[in-house]
Image: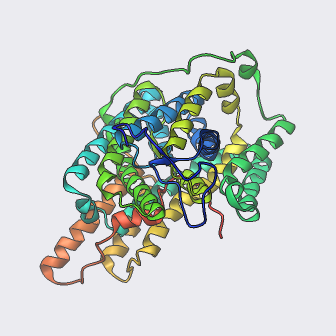
Amino acid sequence: MSMLGTKWKLHGNGKSIRPGEVVKPDERLAWPLTIGVGMQHVVAMFGATFLVPIITGMPPATTLFFSGIGTLLFLVITKGQVPSYLGSSFAFIAPIMASQQQYGIPGALGGVVLAGVGLAIIGAVVQKFGAGWINRLMPPIVTGAIVGLIGLNLAPAARNNFDAAPVTALITLATIIVTSVFFRGILGRLSILVGVVLGYAVAMIRGEVDFTKVDSAAWVGLPFFQTPEFHLGVVGLFVPVVLVLVAENIGHVKSVSAMTGQNLDGVSGRALMADGAATVLAGMGGGSGTTTYAENIGVMAATKVYSTAAYWVAGIFAVALSFSPKFGELIATVPAGVLGGAATMLYGMIGVLGVKIWVQNKVNFANPINLTTAAVALIVGIADYTWTIGDLKFTGIALGSAAALVIYHGMKAIAKARGTVAEPETEGPVAAAAAAATAVRRAPKKRR
């Protein structure tokens, strides 16, 4: 494989995959089939990636542009060893919305850049020293609490959109729920996209969609780029996102390792650095922060094609789509009711993913250290506690995440010194991330 990971061996005859075989990252099928799989990856990420800019008021076409560019950058930095699509991370929704209230979109973009820099630095440390220190810093009880409180903190935003058009929102939500269990294969995995499309059709019938900007937009043109502003006050909002992105990326690498039978632990640091670089790039130009996408893991699992060639196709196709202002404006017309229905599912899923981490790692809540860590962190996050120090304003997500870390490690240190409580489970935060399968804003998967 070349330094860029762009030299692929043809798998078999290039036209079929024999039972029990997979197309490995350094292999490809014939180009017509590879292009088809690549375009399917764009469809898979479509619904979730566009919900982030629509909810936060950022330009959808710009987000799509940096999603495609970020994917290509990820493939280059990981030398084509980790097949992945970088879409919008739902972990950024709450801090972007909070920072916009005080500093506008430029201030929010500054926070996205800072989060990307932080992730890239952690990636460099992981690449140098391994991921063991993450296990010690973020055991499952802490990881689960942070992931959970990010989703639950967003509940009021979901309710506000739902209340704007309850009928449309209810139909959207019901469609997502039914689709996830009614259909098999890829359609079941795209339940959120199906729900949004049907909800959008209902909104059109009810006169809730405004096409004014779509009619006036050009068919071809550049995405709308914006530059960031940097404010100290957003730092506390975006630090917890970095911890979630670490969990998502390492979980993605471990998931791909398990499916391909290849040990990719050696490129975990590169994956973190790549997503960090892609997030910095997005923040510098007006896009949403990125993360690896579980929806696309679903496509790989269904097709048995793990070729990075398909992801090059997906990235290029996404960039090409972003150069249609009319397409971007059409996406931006999704009304509040549709968003409310989808967000009710998505934000709840983020919260439950935190619980899933606890369950799969068998966290012992009979231990007061675990119980107290989760109890305090969740209430601080859900109630959106705030603390202002000069120009710095810390809100529920930042304070809840800090509470989880400080309470866990503080209580553990005191208990160890005093010999009062048996040590809680401390191993497995990286495994927890894999169990959550690149969490935080995922479409529900079809039960097999």
Farthest residue, direction right:
205
In the displayed structure, 393 sits above or below 372; it is above
| Residue occupying the point 43% across, 38% down | 6
Q: Residue at x 60, y 43 (%)?
A: 30
Q: Position of residue 56 (x, y in %)?
A: 55, 36
* Quadrant in the rendering for residue 4: top left
Q: Residue at x 33, y 28 (%)?
A: 230
- Residue 378 x, y percent position in the rendering: 43, 63
Q: Is residue 44 visible?
A: yes
Question: Please, is residue 250 above or below residue 310 in the view?
Answer: below
**Quadrant of the rendered structure where residue 362 is?**
bottom left
Check the image and name the residue furthest to the left.
417
- In x, y percent, where is residue 247? 38, 56
Residue 67 left/right relative to 201 = left
Q: Nearer the viewer, residue 430 or 383?
A: 430
Q: Quadrant of the C terminus?
A: bottom right
The image shows residue 182, relative to residue 175, as above or below, that is below
325 relative position to 203: left or right: left
Q: Is residue 47 left or right of residue 235?
A: right
Along the viewing direction, whichever of 236 and 59 lies nearer the viewer: 59
Q: Position of residue 112 (x, y in %)?
A: 40, 36
